[in-house]
Amino acid sequence: MNATLKETKELIMDAAIVLFNTKGYDGTGVRDIAKKAKVNPANISYYFKGKQGLLEACLTQFFEGYLSCLEEKVFLLEMAPPDECLKQGLKSILSFQRENHLLTRFVWREVSIDSQISREIIASYLVKEKYLFHLILEQGIKEGIFANLPESLVIIQLKSLLTMPFLQSQYLREVWHTFPQEKYFVEKYMIMIERWIDSTLCSLQETRHFDRKII
Amino acid sequence: MNATLKETKELIMDAAIVLFNTKGYDGTGVRDIAKKAKVNPANISYYFKGKQGLLEACLTQFFEGYLSCLEEKVFLLEMAPPDECLKQGLKSILSFQRENHLLTRFVWREVSIDSQISREIIASYLVKEKYLFHLILEQGIKEGIFANLPESLVIIQLKSLLTMPFLQSQYLREVWHTFPQEKYFVEKYMIMIERWIDSTLCSLQETRHFDRKII
Amino acid sequence: MNATLKETKELIMDAAIVLFNTKGYDGTGVRDIAKKAKVNPANISYYFKGKQGLLEACLTQFFEGYLSCLEEKVFLLEMAPPDECLKQGLKSILSFQRENHLLTRFVWREVSIDSQISREIIASYLVKEKYLFHLILEQGIKEGIFANLPESLVIIQLKSLLTMPFLQSQYLREVWHTFPQEKYFVEKYMIMIERWIDSTLCSLQETRHFDRKII
Amino acid sequence: MNATLKETKELIMDAAIVLFNTKGYDGTGVRDIAKKAKVNPANISYYFKGKQGLLEACLTQFFEGYLSCLEEKVFLLEMAPPDECLKQGLKSILSFQRENHLLTRFVWREVSIDSQISREIIASYLVKEKYLFHLILEQGIKEGIFANLPESLVIIQLKSLLTMPFLQSQYLREVWHTFPQEKYFVEKYMIMIERWIDSTLCSLQETRHFDRKII
DNA sequence: AATGAATGAGTGTTCATTCAT
DNA sequence: AATGAATGAACACTCATTCAT
């Protein structure tokens, strides 16, 4: 009556992303979502087979987009230097997260909960993400561009740098009066990440710490 | 009957930290907590004036300890070089978070939600945290040890590096078979952070990017 | 698209009888019925003006068939002895119920509920049933074949014997490994009923109990 | 506040029996029950762990009482003739059902539905009931008092005669203006059942029908 | 004739909390 | 200090039905 199929489904998702982001998944009721989307609450079960299905739809949408950012750039490995590929990949992810900053914040928060669904997300998407990062890092080390640091720690740092600004956007806003969804912020922040790559990752200074102290 | 005042209160907090961490604040019921703590649910309202009060107690406990890690080291600024102060502060925080890794994960997740209480946390504790970091960085720049990078971005990166391993501990566990609560991990990870300080923060390479492009 | 008018209507009724029988009227949803019948749920409202209309159609179908069994045999009263008419009537009903055992079970169960519709059923069909039984019994008593027992109790017993095997078919199946829908069972059971007629109803032993004790 | 533990629990059960009887289990809402019992709907889950638990409590209460009627009389087998034991057992059951006529109607109706719970009832209580009847009939046949009729059919007829008046009490009321819960009715009806025992069960007339026709 | 989107009322259940004891 | 009965509001979800197509 008041919307076509596509519209209703999208209205629900849009409202859900805002509310999940603001109040968390468990803190959001289906009635709130329906009210915000100006549709009938029953439509949520109708289209997404329940609140959890709606969550899954959001997660899927995010990770499909997220991973495709990386995938694209991995293909460039054959014709571009690994550090360039890495920088472009990170930039692409930053842009994607900037465009979907509400979704981004809530997804990374939700994945940090020990639920069945977050375990599934990790098992599928994040394992793949690990593999894609691995391809780039491996190539960089082989070419002698990247320092031979423990891969896990490098990737964790990378992911930290990529994710935190969005996850803690409220902190940024209230303490630093800065907004990670602004184009401006992303540009500045990308420079910092590039600096990290150039200085910390590509620096061929001694890596004896790890050689000596740790297995 | 089965516990003294102090014991009951602590039993509740301990159980709450485990469950808030695993299932999130909104995903945890007071009955679950009471059951795990083997006390009567009414005691939660009795001791903490409700579920929210219990949350506040957890948050307070965390941030008091967290900030005191930093504060201690800021006092050293007068007699030790700023980079050493910074390293020690971060190390202290890492250790604190390692010892309270369940609390850590859930607190940083909860603070990312747009609730009244997280706004209060930010206004009090995180503003203070900002100030403490500021003192260290300012001193470092004045002494010509730290590069003159935008303070906000530096602090965000620092906080990212400190927080993410705990926030995404499930990811670390399932993808990397690594546990941030292990002493081993913290030592390795601290080396990476020191590397970041040495290379990225202390590197006096040109900072023209920021001079030119950004305010 | 996938069925003509007649087919769709019948598909719905067939599915409804199975499900009403298994899960009860209130326990069955129109979606379940539509799914089983492989038609669109809206067709139920379309053809039967709602779930209740579907129920009424089932009830009507049953009682029309049920009563015609009796009626046929009442016509024989003029040319056959009453006990023979009675036996044939009961046999006819048993056969009818055997052929419609799913419908039978659910109808007699549903009629035991205090709903508007069951009151209407009673007012129309069961009052007529009473009258038909009355004609046979009256004739039998007049001819001195049937004992002069209270008519209400005789008819209640008759109806009990006819109905219960179908109503409790699950009990029969699981406790006695017997199926009231089998031809075999009905034959055996008919002998028992005939025995009841010969011994209990036709026995002209003293009926003083009732003369003395009861109005 | 408005009732002690025992009272609230019983208020709920009493209200449930009335409503389950009138509208059926699936047709009755927990809010209806709570309203009738003048208690809070949440108490139903609190005391019975949900609507289904309430149903189970009703069923259990009925069958415990029902079976104890039979059990008592089976103990008399050693000192009284089997037909006398049987008559007393049936009379005891009739009285019990008369005193709990609402519960009786709804229980026998509910058991006729193919649910998990009715299957459990049958597996436990009705199998035991079968055994108790068996003990009596076996003794009667051994003593040459009962005709050697197929046990299953005899028991089915017995159960039919016992149950149906209560199950179809609405029919009795509206067609025959008779109430199975009246002491009067039970006495009259018991005479009919005794007549059935004397004439149909104890009659030693030929049982060749079954010998010849059936296995 | 038949469909699928859409609805508002309803479902059973769980919630954090209160209160007399 | 601690309990368990009790509550009212909220929860996610299902219901039979309507209606434009």
Image (spheres, coloured by chain):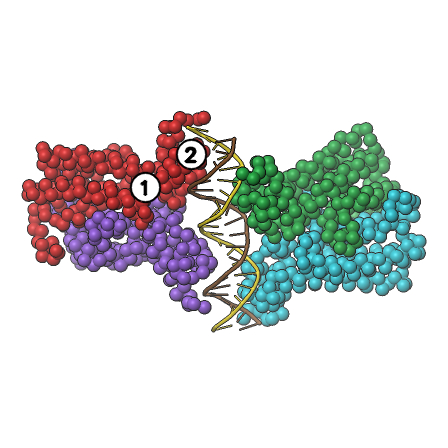
Chain colours: A purple, B red, C cyan, D green, E brown, F yellow
**Label 2: chain?**
B
| Residue at 57%, 38% in the rendered image | D3
Q: Position of residue B203 (x, y in %)?
A: 9, 45
Quadrant hosting residue D203: top right
Which label's residue is closer to the chain start, 2 or 1?
2
Residue at which label 1 appears: B106
| Observer-nearest of B162 and B107 | B107
Quadrant hosting residue A11: bottom left
In the rendered structure, which amino acid carries the disc numbered 2?
Asn
| Residue at 41%, 33% in the rendered image | B37
Q: Position of residue C122 (x, y in %)?
A: 73, 58
Q: Under tag 2, what secondary structure? A: helix
Look at the image and tell me whether residue D119 can be seen. no
Residue at which label 2 appears: B43
2 vs 1, front mark: 2
Quadrant hosting residue C53: bottom right
| Residue at 85%, 64% in the rendered image | C75
Q: Would residue B101 appear left or right of B36 to someone viewing this image?
A: left
Distance from the alpha carbon under mark 2 to that under mark 1? 22 Å
**Label 1: chain?**
B
| Residue at 11%, 54% in the rendered image | B210
Look at the image and tell me whether residue A79 can be seen. yes
Image quarter in which the N terminus of chain D is found? top right
Callouts 2 and 1 in the same chain: yes
In the rendered structure, which amino acid carries the disc numbered 1?
Phe
Q: Position of residue D77 (x, y in %)?
A: 79, 31
| Observer-nearest of D197 and E12 | E12
| Observer-nearest of A59 and A17 | A17
